[in-house]
Every structure is written in structure tokens, then in C-alpha cells.
Image: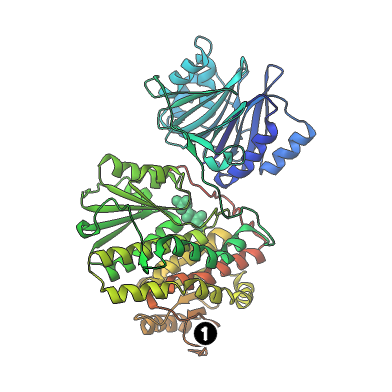
Amino acid sequence: MCGIIGIASNKKVSTNIVNALKKLEYRGYDSAGLATITNGEINEKKCSGRVEKLEKILFQSPNEGNLGIGHVRWATHGVPNEVNAHPHSSEIVSVVHNGIIENSDKLKKEFEKSGTTFKSQTDTEVITVLLTEKLKKLDPLKAVFETIDMLKGSFALGIIFKNHKEFVIGARRGSPLAVGYSNNENYLGSDSYALKSMTNKISYLDDGDVCVLSKDEVKFYNHNKDKINKEIFTLSEDKASVSKGNYKNFMIKEIFEQPVTVKTCLKEYIDKIREEINFYNLPLDPKEINKIVLIGCGTAYHSCLVAKYWFEEFTSINIEVDIASEFRYRKVRFDKKALYIFVSQSGETADTYAALDLCKRQNVKTCSVINVVESSIARNSNCVLPIHAGPEIGVASTKAFLGQMLVLYLLSLKISEVRNDMQNIEYKKKISELKKLPTLISEALKEEEKIQLIAKDICESKGSMFLGRGSSFPIALEGALKLKELSYLHAEGYPAGEMKHGPLALIEDGLPVVVIAPKDKYFEKTLSNMQEVIARGGKVLLLTNSDGKVISENIRFQINLPDSDLTLTPFIFTIPLQLLSYHVALFKKCDIDKPRNLAKSVTVE
Ligand code: AGP
């Protein structure tokens, strides 16, 4: 994964590099580093841990220099320590890298045969060694082209050269890379978000592109080494703030923001006067669609799973759901009349992007449900449906999940109406029910105090289970994912009806089991499954909307959530699960916004 930055300026760059690295920490936060050219030498500083630590090192011993590169790491090859942190420098060249060099072992072995020793365990150092060799005979640009020709895998690179303190070279294949423009200063960054505080003028490198960035100009070359021009985009203003305000951390802020983000998204898509859902630019006429394929990873994949129930309920279209990392390697039969929908908060997830790219090459119609509208996935799909959630900073996705579900819900309704799968009166009723969603979510958030008590009760458990049927099944998966990623407590999400086929063996005295049972058509069946758990000693937290009545004396906790149109329960029942994982993690003193081993944007396979 990792985030990279490069700056060429007429003034010192290290403070701006550090500030940009702080923005990139969502891509990796297990080590950080930078290098500048100071008095004609490469001056490298790096450490394990956060950018804050790097900042302290620089405070003790500042880096001079008007040209530099920086990096935040999410370890792939080699433990997160100072030696493995980027940049990786030789006497004459310094490199930061995002991606994975798949043939690094082979290249390393060849160098080792001729006596080269490697300092780190990383795949990146081989790039430094290759460049150092090539620079003996070639100028920097040619050396970069020859080097990247030898690399297999994915990369976004930022490179500085001891003997050329006037430029940074950037190169991209597979991993994203943006260029930003300002007066007497130009930038290279893994994404536009990192550059946003310095400029709103951005270009994007395509696969195979190389750029040479000096303070006054940026030159671009394509994979054939031909000079090319790039379109310059003006970034949109962020309406939402990226500060924590009075909240303890971003995650809890983002959980409590949800009534507002849902309201904003509804406003964007529902025409107030005509009570109509607007989707103007779908790449296929809904009447012509014979299949919809929903693709995503992690939480985004869960939103696809929920949406399958809505599309099946509202439309007559066949629906498939796929995990992007599986889809990209399967022998998929592509269908020109199918709509391939890619769901991603960041829009940079490598697996999702690769699956989209596969569809693009097959010339089938794609659509992306995205939070970051300038992202690679958004730019490469036929149609973009933004979720309008504002920046999501906490690594655990919360408001983006609700946003993804909401856009997919709206899309399923609209497609159903256009195809006459749903009667207009029902369609209008669903829209009016949807408008109640912000209030219903606010009501659900009021359960926080009760959830704190439950969190205290379960935080020392060695495992947990989350059960649901119908659209509550993917919500169970999402609840379990949130709990494991935030609190490192083992959690399994399961369809309640599957328990008897194996997982029931896991139930023992005191094991926390969260049962998601809205009063829908599955209600009675889910309660029977719950009783089977209780009979074996499971400690049940029941989420339902049964008007406050306790359903069974043997339930340890029960939370009654507000009633709604039954197709809307996934939105409401997600809230207590987000709060539960948050409070368990808080009791366990875990790092809420940056859980161990993870990153916000997963740009490796
Ligand atoms: C969510 O809490 C996770 N951190 C993770 O599963 C995430 O949803 C997944 O990596 C996909 O990210 P994306 O939405 O940016 O593509």
C-alpha cells in the first residue's frame, strides 16, 4: 500500500512533505521517512511508527533542501522497522515506492551473485540498486525507463538524484500517482487528497507514464518514451471538515455524522419537487439490463451483499455479487447487457480497480459507487455515482458503508421503476419512507449508553458470533468485521440458519452472540436459531424492533430499534453494531482510527 510524496520548490520542502505524509497516513502508518538534497548530498531520515515520530526527529535535526520525497509505509516485504522504512537510498539516488515488485527476489539474487549486499528486506531496494547501476552510464530519465522496464508488479515511484537537485522523477504502473501544480513549486503524490492543502490543480499519471517535476514545470512521457500533455483538473472544494471537532476520534465522529451524510445523499439524488430519484447517466438503459454484477472488498463488499436483496426484491434482474480479489482471477463470462457496479469508498483499492480494468478491457458497461470522486476507479468507470459522505478518515468504514448502501438502494428503486418492475405508487411510498432515514438513524444512535454497558460485558471474551437472515446476514458479516478490525476480538458473521451445519459447535458458556432479528419475514426463524444458541450457553445480544417487549428471559441484552419500512432495516441495525465495536475497542484501549496492521486505502493485491 503506502503513500508517496515528492516536492520540487524554490523554498525548503521538508515541512510540506511531513504535512502531506500526515494526510497519506490512511494508506499506511507503520513507518515513515523522507529524503531531501542538502548541500549536494542525499539526506535521508526515517523511522518505524507514525509521521509524528518522524516530525520529532526532524525537529531535533531539520532537513534543508528545496527538493525531496517522502513515504508512509504499510509493510509488505520485511517487518516495519527503520531499515525497511523508505526512502531507500544509495550514494547517488533515493527512492520511495508504493506497490509490490514481484520479481524482486530474482533480481536481488542476480545482484548478490556479483557481490552486492542489500541493507533491507524490502522489494523496493532492488529499484535503488538497479538505478544506481544504470546511472553509471545513462542520464536519470533513461535510467528510470530502463529500470522500470525490468520490474514486474506494481509501482508508483518518487525518485531524487544527488547530482540533479532540480528535479524529482515520478513513474507509475498499477499504483496511483498524481501531480499537483503551484507557483514556483510542483508536487507528486499518491492521491490528490495529500496535495489538496497545497494546490487544487491536478493531473493524473496513467499506467506506464513517467514525469519529471521541477519547480517551474512538469514534463510527462508515456510508456513509449514520447513526450505527452496531460489534462489539468481543478479539484472540488470539500464541504465536510476533516477535523475531529469535539469528538475523541474520527470514527465516533463519523458514526454520529451519519444522519447528516444520509440526508445529504438523499438530497443529491431525490428531486424534491417531483419526488423522483435522479440517475442521469447510467451507461445502459435499465430496460435493457439482463444482469447486474456488484463487486467490492471488505465493507464495500458487504454493501453489495445487502444490495443483492434489494435488487432481487425490487427488480426482475439477475444479480451476482463478487469479491474483487476473486472476480479478477475467475474465468468470467462477460455479458454486454450486464451492468458491472464497483463499490469503493477510496476508489483506489487495487483489487477493485483491477476488476474494473478487466471489465474495461472486455468493453462491458461499468458504474462506480464511490466516495472520492477524483479517484482512479471513478475516473475509469463509465458512470460515477458518488455517495456524498465527505472524507472518511477512520480506517474502519462507517458512514461510507451507509452511503454505499443508500446509493445502491436508490439505484435498485430507480431501475425497478424504469423497468415497471415496481408500481409507481409503491415507488413513491418507498421514497417517502427513505426520507425518514436520517431521523431513524438518530434514534438508533441514542442506544449508545446501553451499548457501552454491553461492550464492557463482552470486551474480555475470547470470541463472538454475529447472526442474521436475509439482508441481516450481510449486516452480521459487517458487525463481525468491525469488531475484529477495531478490537482484535475474534468475531464470525454467519447466516443464522447455517449454525446447525457446523458453527453451533463453537457455542459455549458465555460466548457473546449478537442476533440481528428485525421483525421481517425471517423473524420467527431467527428467534428459533437464537434459542438454539441460548440452550448451549451463548450470551445473546438481541437486536430487534419489537416495541420494547422482552422476547425471552434468557436473553442477556436486548436493544429495540425504531420501526421502519422493512427494506430499510440494514441501515438502522448497522448503527448499534458500529457503536458496539467502537466501545469494545475503547475498553481494550485499541487505536480506534488506526487499527494495527491495516490501512485506509488498500493499494496492494
Ligand atoms: C472497512 O472497515 C475496512 N477497513 C475495509 O474492509 C474496506 O472497506 C475495504 O478495504 C475496501 O475499501 P474501499 O471501500 O476503499 O474500496
> Which residue sits at x=49%, y=69%?
574
Q: Is residue 433 left or right of residue 118?
A: left
Can residue 504 be seen in this snapshot?
no
Q: Where is residue 307 in the image (x, y as percent from the top left)?
A: 36, 64
Is 516 placed above or below 171 here?
A: below
Q: Front-most of 533 and 153?
A: 153
**Along the horizontal axis of the image, is 110 left or right of 42?**
left
Could you say which quadrant of the image residue 529 lies in? bottom left
In-front residue for pair 119/357: 357
Q: Mark 1 points at which residue?
A: 555
Q: Which residue is drawn at 48% across and 20% down?
A: 144
Identify the residue shown where x is 40% and y is 24%: 222
Query: Residue 110: where, in percent of width, then height?
Result: 46, 20
As shown in the figure, which amino acid type bears the numbered disc 1? Ile
Query: For disc 1, does the CB lie below 8 Å from ligand 1?
Result: no
- Give the left or right position of residue 248, taking residue 458 as reference: right
Q: Is residue 51 above or below residue 475?
A: above
Residue 131 lies, with reference to residue 482, above or below; the image says above
Could you tell me residue 383's position as x and y percent? 34, 49
Q: What element carries label 1?
A: loop
Location of residue 81 in the rendering, given as x and y in whole percent from the top left corner: 64, 38
The residue depicted at 28 percent of the width and 63 percent of the height is 415
- Quadrant where the C terminus sits is top left
Can you name the residue that lies furthest to the top here? Answer: 137
